[in-house]
Amino acid sequence: MNRRAGGGGAGRGRHLSEQSAAAPTLGDPLASQPTAVEKPHFHGHRERLRRRFLEAGGAALADYELLELILFNAIPQRDVKPLAKSLIDRFGSFAETIAAAPERLAEVDGVKDRAIAEFKIVEAAARRFAKGAVKKRLPMGSWSEVVDYCRTSMAFEPRELFRVLFLDKKNGLIADEIQGAGTVDHTPVYPREVIRRALELSATALVLVHNHPSGDPTPSTQDVRMTLDIMAIAKPLGVTVHDHLIVGRDGHASLKGMRLI
């Protein structure tokens, strides 16, 4: 028994010795090197996309890539390219995605409150920027800014809205007001109420605007008739209707430009 015990002790000694020999020592350079942690593959993609945006501008990026840039803040630990492409497939474009109702955005798998908030911040910023450009002054020479503002504010609304830009003698913007909200294809408009409000604000000119949720801005016969009714009431009171703009996803139409008024 003593020999077996002694042999076992020697075996254990050899085993411990082998383990000690295999283990790195403090002087071993391998022991001093930390284990490298690989970054997810999308980290490099994020840096490259941000750099491309800063160097080339937004015009150089596809719609889904602009959405990616927004989603980076909302979803920091995930590849968001598939989600961005899904959003474009669902809503059609960058602008339509940003303008989509929160409840519709939430229907897309992977879109949570943080992402929706980021989209709505961008939407609010775009509207504030466009309105700021118009609010400084509304000279007819900057008509493109007026159109851009109206499209930004209304083109992607799911129901018809009728708004009026009330102007002073120098075509400065006095007020921008929604005068009616309706359904997907109709908005009630009361010409006398529009002119009453113009007189209250001491406005001398108006720009009428409404949207077509269908996307097609082509004016209807009713659109033209309503505009002529407002003009008939406004003219004897010294109020001029500069134009009636119709905006939609597919562009805009000017009744004056089309010589319908």
Image (cartoon, rainbow, N blue to C red):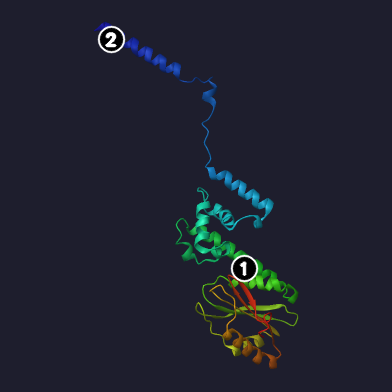
Q: Quadrant of residue 134?
A: bottom right
Reading the image, the residue beneath label 1 is 127
Q: Position of residue 73 (x, y in %)?
A: 55, 53
In this rendering, the answer to whether 201 lies above or below 138 is: below
Name the residue rendered at 53%, 43% in the picture.
41
Circles 1 and 2, Cβ within 8 Å, touching? The answer is no
Q: Residue at x 57, y 61 (%)?
A: 94
Question: Total label count?
Answer: 2
Residue at position x 39%, y 16% in the image: 16
Q: Residue 33: in sight, yes or no?
A: yes
Q: Nearer the viewer, residue 225 or 38?
A: 225
SS for dot 2: helix
Mark 2 Cα within 10 Å, few/some/many (few <14, many 20+)?
Answer: few
The x, y position of residue 168, in whole percent, is: 72, 82
User: Looking at the rendering, in which quadrant would you find the C terminus?
Assistant: bottom right
Q: Give how far across and how far down residue 163 sits, in percent.
A: 60, 79
N-term mark: 1 or 2: 2
Q: CA distance from mark 1 to mark 2?
A: 88 Å
Q: Residue at x 62, y 50 (%)?
A: 50
Which residue type carries mark 1?
Arg
Q: Quadrant of residue 221?
A: bottom right
Q: Amino acid at mark 2?
A: Ala
Q: Is residue 228 above or below residue 251?
A: below
Q: Residue furthest top?
A: 3
20 and 146: which is toward the camera: 146
Circle 1 sits in a helix, a strand or a loop, which is it? Answer: helix
Q: Which residue is mark 2?
A: 5
- Identify the image quadrant of the N terminus: top left
93 or 138: nearer the eye? 93
